[in-house]
Amino acid sequence: PFFVSGFALSRFFVFGIMTSSLIQKYTGKEFRDLKPAASGPSAATKIGLFVFFVFTRAVHPTIIDASKSINEETGKKYFAYGQMTVVLGETVVTLVIASLMALVLGGMSEWRMIWKPGPMKVFSLIGFVYALGDYLEMASMGSLGGAAYQILLQSKLVITALMMWGIKGIKQTTLQWNILVLVMLSMCVYMIGGSKSGGSDGGIPIMGVFNVLLKVTVSCFCAVLSDKYMKDYKDEPIYVQLVQFKCAWFATILAISFMDGKTWQNGFFSGWNGVTVGVLTSFTVKGWSTMYLLAILDSVLKNIGEASAVLVIYAAQVILPSFDDKFEIPTFLSVMVVILSVTAYVGSKSVVEKASKYDAMHQQGSSFAKSPSGSGRAAEH
């Protein structure tokens, strides 16, 4: 037996030496050609995009507010130009630029992708609803200041929560509902004590507020649909999808412009000036940046950015000479309460998710301890 085991051991030793000679040693250079996994944009890039996002969200209502003229008899602000002319002009500019991009970057084959029946039907419907949102935006800005408009846009948090509850059955916790109520109350405080634009007696412009709430509802609905179907048709470039959006968008705004009794009766460019061109540019930049930036920034940064835009708008209205607003501590504090309450709600999401995971793990542990197998193992220990 000793001879047999020694012979087997010697064979095993020789086999080990031969095998080790055949195996290559690891030098660390084997994976040098392997590309690292994409980690997304860098922190500096995200900060830059976030600042640009806040800037575009702040400039848009500010320049619309600055484009108003003042009625010398009543002292009220109004749009001297047709409200739909800038929106109609933006749709034309976007259609032309996006179509040219499809032709130049992808040739005729990519340009033909625009007219595919499936995505064209879907994005045309969404574009129709987006056009109604643009109409509501300009209608509300006719009686609201830029800061008041941006503050009321924060009601999207409440409307989104109600939609998620009704459509997907996703409920908010008591903490989240309390913060949402705080957001609504802080908005009311600003509108009552801080907003001085609008009605004849300085009161709250009810129709302006109602139009904003409708605009927010439309935007939330369109955002859900856009996110879903843009992912379903992700083989199409964004500029191709923009053309599909803007076809119905243009047709809807054109139809509305014939019914407002002002756009074509007074002349399309009646009342236009340099600031009006700025409004057109702002609509165009906002439309393109929304499609591209929201694909990079997460929802947390997006919501915080839109809330931070309120403070930028308020600062612009105080500093710029084209506005009559003066710095007032109560108004500033009400703006800060809105921003901080929105930030608190956005931040509560991760806390609630972690608490839910902890509760689930705790329940699993409790159920395991109460089970016969769990009790038996505990007794053995």
Image (cartoon, rainbow, N blue to C red):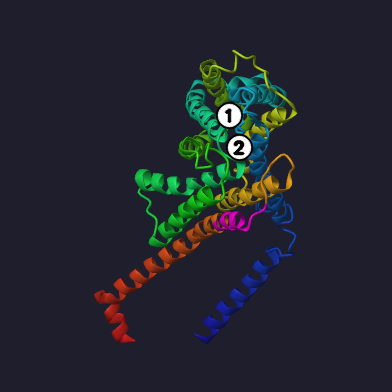
**What residue is drawn where x is 75% and y is 28%?**
274
Residue 377 among magenta residues: no
Tell me how far mark 1 sits from mark 2, CA to CA.
Answer: 10 Å
Labelled disc at residue 291: 2
| Coordinates of residue 145 in the picture (x, y in percent) | 60, 40
Q: Quadrant of the C terminus?
A: bottom left
| Secondary structure that dominates the magenta span | helix
Q: Where is 168 relative to 200, above or below? A: below
Q: Pointer 1 and pointer 2: residues touching (CB < 8 Å)?
A: yes
Q: Which residues are magenta?
A: 327-337
Q: Residue furthest left?
A: 372
Q: State whether residue 331 appears in this view.
A: yes
Give the residue type that dot 2 points to: Met
Residue 21 percent location from the top left of the image: 70, 67
The residue located at (75%, 60%) in the rendering is 29
Q: Is residue 174 above or below residue 323?
A: below
Q: Which mark is residue 340?
A: none
Badge 2 marks a residue whose secondary structure is helix
Q: Can residue 289 be seen in this snapshot?
A: no
Question: Which of marks 2 and 1 precedes in the sequence?
Answer: 1
Element type at mark 1: helix
Image position, residue 64 (x, y; %) = 64, 34
The amino acid beneath tag 1 is Gln
Q: Which label sits on residue 241? A: 1
